Image: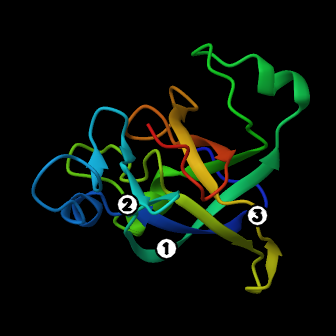
Amino acid sequence: MRVPLIKPVLAVIARLDTTGTWAANPAGSPTAGYDPDFREPYPVHQGANFTDARVYMAEVYVPCQFRTKRYGEERTTFGGDAPLTNFVFVFHRKDLERLSLLGSDRNPLLKKGDKIVRVLNKRGATVFTPELPLYIYRLDPASQGFGPDGFDIHIATTTERSNEPMGR
């Protein structure tokens, strides 16, 4: 038995290209590129401002359920870390597999740092565009006991944040 998505929409996701972002780092100290420990691009100092050298892959259109979290849920996260999380996306493994977004180890290729660009309805009209960039903060398996891999869905918790890196 497989758990279906209810009233799916399409999330337009720009996947973070860690190899391309890493390549943005010239030889020498890590002033640009990708930090494997923090799983974030290094900030780049340009004059008085900081930017980063994020490189994204082509956008993918992934069917999902999309909802807003309640205030109480935002403050009680499992890991003890409570980002400014407003939106949750639920992805089905069969859709990830159909779109080649499952790796050889059967884990999703969506990851922390992937950007949700917009959400479309079934007819392709935009129903939501984030005011601030919306990034996947964590991706957890759910619906244990269903599907051939033991679960059918993945829940993506997102966080909004400015494009301006704070620097390190």
Quarter holding the N terminus?
A: top right
- Quarter-of-image position of residue 23: bottom left
What is the quadrant of the C terminus in the image?
top left
Residue type of the residue flagged with mark 1? Val
Q: How many residues crowd mark 3 within 10 Å: few (<14), some (14–19), many (20+)?
A: few
User: Which one is earlier in the sequence, the residue at label 2 or at label 3?
Assistant: 2
Do labels 2 and 1 touch, CB within 8 Å? yes
Q: Is residue 96 above or below residue 125?
A: above
- Residue 70 seen in the figure: yes
Q: Which labelled disc corresponds to residue 101?
A: 2
Residue hosting label 1: 60
| Extreme residue in the right direction | 71
Task: For mark 1, give the secondary structure.
Answer: strand
Q: Position of residue 76 (x, y in %)?
A: 75, 16
Number of the front mark, 2 or 1: 1
Compare residues 62 and 2 and report the one nearer the observer: 62
Along the line of sight, the residue nearer the viewer: 4 or 135: 135
Check disc 2: other Cα within 10 Å, few if <14, some if 14-19, many if 20+: some
The disc labelled 2 sits on which kind of residue? Leu
Q: What separation in Å lies between label 2 and label 1 (alpha carbons)? A: 9 Å
Q: Is residue 110 left or right of residue 126?
A: left
- Farthest-out residue, left: 27
| Residue under the point 28% across and 56% down | 33
In terms of image quadrants, where is residue 26? bottom left
Tags 2 and 3 touching, CB below 8 Å? no
User: The residue under label 3 is which amino acid type?
Assistant: Pro
Question: Residue 134, percent across and down?
Answer: 65, 56
Residue for point 59% across, 43% down: 156
Q: Residue at x 79, y 27 (%)?
A: 74
Q: Which residue in the protein does label 3 denote?
A: 130
Query: Where residue 115 sits in the image (x, y, percent)?
Result: 55, 60
Residue 1 appears in the figure: no
